[in-house]
Image: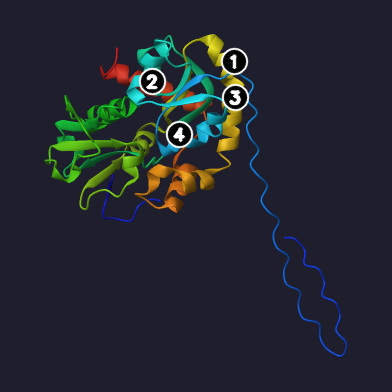
């Protein structure tokens, strides 16, 4: 846990000059650097599909250039799973909890939004020790982050039953909570500076400290196996290109006016992991196992 008042983690060769008679030749001016090459567009191979994406900065590298082929729909994380199941979306960058609650959905193992250590964008804010928390204020769009917060509070801080209360996080004032209350923030709003004097608990950091494993917040999911197989190569190509453009994403993302663009680039580079390999799968499985062990899911 950290106090919000502390510092945040955080040629071309020149052409030789022509000789001058009876004088020393002046140094040649350095040649101008070559113009940057335009980014290579992603070569899509599947038919256009309906794609659900979370409207957050950390999702942008996974949807790089997709709007030029697929239909993108900004969707709240807690709605992704049902929209997939109903066939209103073909694929979605869905919260990992949806795979626990709707196991008929198909994970496409080509990329994820995860962390191994501090994540910055999923945090608890409190005035007192987490052991005393009896009420948790959350954004009702969240799914995985709420389960992660409840798990951490119950298993490692011994809080027992915590009342979960949904609020409009955009207008909620965290600094007004009581010592026995805490606030869960996730997404872009959690990248803002926390109110002075509040204790900040980074849930990605807490998870890895307790388990030694990475945490997976969201994965690509499809409504069925056929869709997953058809679009898998597209998603891999998009991620491969997207992670090359953190600076450009940070510069052009419209939702980061509340924090500095260099911090946004650093966040994408250092805090978010887009891998989805065996280590991430083990972290995901551990999360599901502990949720069941603590009675938070069936």
- Contact between labelled residues 1 and 2, with CB atoms less than 8 Å apart: no
On screen, residue 19 above or below 117: below
Which of the 4 quarters of the picture holds residue 123? top left
Query: What label sits on residue 59 in the rendered view?
Result: 4
Q: Whole-percent x and y of residue 164?
A: 18, 27
- Which circle's residue, 2 or 1, is located before the other in the chain? 2
Residue 116 in sight in this render:
no
Q: CA distance from mark 4 to mark 1?
A: 21 Å
Q: Is residue 57 left or right of residue 22?
A: left
Q: CA distance from mark 3 to mark 1?
A: 8 Å
How would you rate the neighbour count of disc 2 (Cα within 10 Å): few for under 14, some for 14-19, many for 20 or more?
A: many
Task: Identify which residue is drawn at 28% across, 28% down.
Answer: 146
- Which circle's residue, 3 or 4, is located before the other in the chain? 4
Task: Identify which residue is drawn at 87% across, 90% down.
Answer: 22
Residue 183 in sight in this render:
yes
- Contact between labelled residues 2 and 4, with CB atoms less than 8 Å apart: no
Task: Identify which residue is drawn at 50% across, 43% down.
Answer: 249
Q: Is residue 6 left or right of residue 102?
A: left
- Contact between labelled residues 1 and 3, with CB atoms less than 8 Å apart: no
């Amino acid at each position: 846990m950290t106090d919000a008042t502390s510092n945040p983690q955080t040629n071309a060769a020149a052409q030789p000059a022509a000789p001058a008679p009876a004088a020393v030749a002046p140094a040649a001016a350095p040649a101008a650097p070559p113009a940057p090459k335009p980014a290579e567009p992603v070569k899509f191979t599947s038919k256009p599909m309906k794609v659900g994406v979370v409207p957050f900065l950390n999702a942008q590298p996974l949807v790089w250039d997709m709007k030029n082929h697929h239909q993108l729909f900004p969707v709240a994380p807690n709605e992704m799973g049902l929209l997939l199941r109903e066939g209103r979306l073909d694929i979605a960058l869905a919260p990992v909890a949806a795979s626990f609650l709707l196991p008929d959905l198909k994970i496409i193992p080509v990329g994820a939004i995860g962390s191994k250590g501090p994540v910055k964008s999923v945090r608890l804010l409190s005035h007192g020790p987490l052991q005393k928390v009896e009420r948790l204020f959350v954004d009702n769009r969240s799914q995985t982050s709420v389960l992660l917060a409840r798990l951490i509070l119950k298993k490692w801080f011994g809080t027992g039953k915590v009342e979960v209360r949904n609020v409009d996080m955009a207008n909620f004032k965290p600094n007004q909570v009581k010592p026995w209350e805490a606030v869960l923030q996730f997404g872009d709003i959690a990248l803002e500076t926390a109110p002075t004097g509040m204790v900040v608990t980074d849930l990605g950091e807490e998870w890895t400290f307790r388990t030694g494993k990475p945490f997976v917040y969201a994965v690509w999911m499809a409504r069925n196996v056929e869709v997953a197989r058809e679009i898998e190569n597209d998603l891999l190509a998009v991620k491969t290109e997207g992670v090359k453009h953190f600076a450009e994403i940070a510069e052009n993302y419209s939702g980061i006016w509340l924090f500095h663009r260099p911090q946004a680039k650093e966040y994408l580079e250092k805090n978010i992991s887009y891998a989805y390999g065996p280590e991430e799968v083990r972290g995901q499985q551990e999360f599901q196992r502990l949720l069941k062990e603590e009675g938070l899911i069936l």
